[in-house]
Image: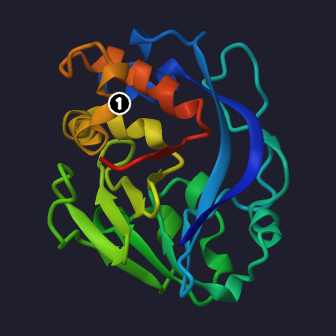
Amino acid sequence: MEIKAVKFRKDGFYTQPFIFGGEEGMDRFDKNVRYRGSLQNYLIDTGEEVILVDTGVPAGTPEEVVDENSLIFTGKDICTYMEAFEALGYKPEQVTKILLTHKHNDHSGELRSFPNAEIYVNADETGAEELQGLDNIVPVTFTDGAYYNFPESQKIADGIYYIKAKGHTNGNSIVIVENDCLSICSTEISHIWTRHCMRTSFRSYLTIFPQHARHWTASVNSSASIRRSTAEHTLLRDTRILRQSA
């Protein structure tokens, strides 16, 4: 099984208020603190299937105009999402499944470009405007029980799990891939720790990766400081974490 990055924007940033303001209010955070980021999604080649995690922004989406008050800059165009996808050597017809982490158009932009794919999405997200008119949606109700400390999961294929992670949106999810190492494929990884998801998902992260507990000295109840250090740990890794499984 291989995981490949589909990278189409670079040199972006996300400010503290944008990342952390959902729970405690944007005014609680410093807009001058920026975390580096890029726009990239993921392709999982199992040897039998080609599975995508999100599908980028729609072709033709302009770069944001940035000034000192900008909360987010998704980055400078490298190419379109579809160009980045095809540069990996695949054709749209080969994709069998798309695992959508959430509805926003920087994740769902090219869903309609893959004619043979089933689109797996948290059932709580299926009413989103971005998903209307699609007849290949598979609503996920997370019937496979807990994955470690994450209470709700759905097994998609051998070694691939879709995890309920409400927070960034009501239907936010993450994708976990078990290979030689354990990978979290989510282009909004920092948002796992925001809002209601904070208390379960952060504890789950330390359960799956207990060797990294030393990186956080704050109490789990000190959510703001944990989220700040967590974001620095994750966003500076191009929003993808590769860690040896516990």
Q: Position of residue 53 (x, y in %)?
A: 53, 64
- Position of residue 234 relative to residue 114, above or below, is above
Q: Residue at x 35, y 50 (%)?
A: 245
User: Which SS class for mark 1?
Assistant: helix
Whole-percent x and y of residue 140? 30, 72
Q: Residue at x 22, y 41 (%)?
A: 207
The amino acid type, in three-letter code, at marker 1 is: His
Establish if 220 lies above or below 127. Answer: above
Q: Quadrant of residue 230?
A: top left
Q: Is residue 141 left or right of residue 30?
A: left
Q: Which of 170/33 is in front?
A: 33
Whole-percent x, y for residue 36 in the image: 65, 27
Name the residue carrying label 1. Answer: 212
Residue displayed at 79% across by 30% down: 65
Drawn side of residue 51 relative to residue 161, left or right: right
Would you say 209 lies left or right of 104 here? left
- The quarter holding residue 101 reads bottom left
Q: Is residue 114 visible?
A: yes
Q: Is residue 230 above or below residue 245?
A: above
The structure's colour scheme is rainbow
Tell me the crowding category of disc 1: few under 14, some 14 to 19, or many 20 or more residues within 10 angstroms, Cα based.
Answer: few
Q: Is residue 194 visible?
A: no
Residue 165, percent across and down? Answer: 30, 50
Q: Residue at x 65, y 87 (%)?
A: 94
Seen from the viewer's position, the closer of residues 29 and 10 is 10
Please tell me which residue lies in front, 4 or 194. 4
